[in-house]
Amino acid sequence: MRFSLMTFCALTTLALLPADHAEAEQREAIFAGGCFWCMEPPYDKLEGVISTTSGYIGGETERPTYEQVSGGGTGHAEAVKVVFDDEVVDYATLLDVFWHNIDPFAEGRQFCDVGDQYRSAIFPLDQHQRRLAEASKEEVEARFERDVKTRIEASAPFWKAEEYHQNFYQKNPVRYRFYRAGCGRDDRLEAVWGDAAGTP
């Protein structure tokens, strides 16, 4: 089979592209850890994470609004979708970041935010993620010798939250810091995790 010079150049260029250009290496993960404003920063600073998106998951209502979800009753949880390069960071590492940024012993709430919409939950997107999520939960329970209230829920449609919620900690840093401190998030994380607690 003969190749033209143009075809040969195109194939050579594709072969030489850096690994991070390959679509197959991008994966997604979804975690609910209370206020989604506070779950974006720890992932954004993690090498290998491509993007984070705040949104809603786990309920029946299609295209829910913040007012609907925050009012309760829709079944959704505030969550963050993480797009990552699994050649740089793996799902197990994302799980580790998740646990150290939540209170795994709080049920139907996280920190000062009360209600099922602020529950902590992991939403595995395939069986591999589910196995790792279940194993990580067992590890946390064994470490603390306590029942973990964080749920491992079935995959469900993820609805992107309103634009003003995206990267809120960057758009409104003063309000974000005030909320985070007032909610007692960091104090509780330190009480649970000590020096390994997640950071703002």
Image (cartoon, rainbow, N blue to C red):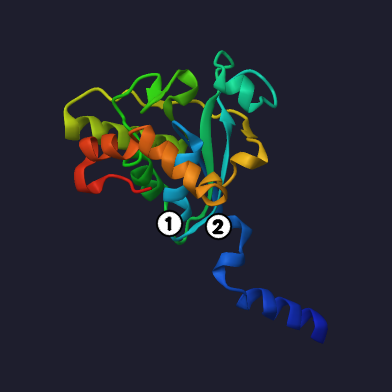
Q: Residue at x 62, y 27 (%)?
A: 66
* Residue 58 vertical placement versus 7 (above, below): above
Q: CA distance from mark 1 to mark 2?
A: 16 Å
Q: Quadrant of residue 137?
A: top left
Quarter of the rendering containing residue 98:
top left
Q: Is residue 126 visible?
A: no
Q: Amino acid at mark 2?
A: Glu
Nearest to the observer: residue 1 or residue 98: 98
Residue extending furthest toward the top: 73
Give the residue at x 74% y 83%: 9
Q: Secondary structure at mark 1?
A: loop
The furthest residue to the bottom: 5
Where residue 93 sits: x, y (%)? 37, 50
Which residue shows up at 68% across the image and 80% down it?
Answer: 12
Q: Which residue is mark 2?
A: 25
Question: Residue, x 36% and y 28% (percent of image)?
Answer: 111
User: Along the polypeptide, which appears first: circle 1 or circle 2?
Assistant: 2
State the quadrant of the N terminus: bottom right
x then y, percent, for residue 35: 47, 33
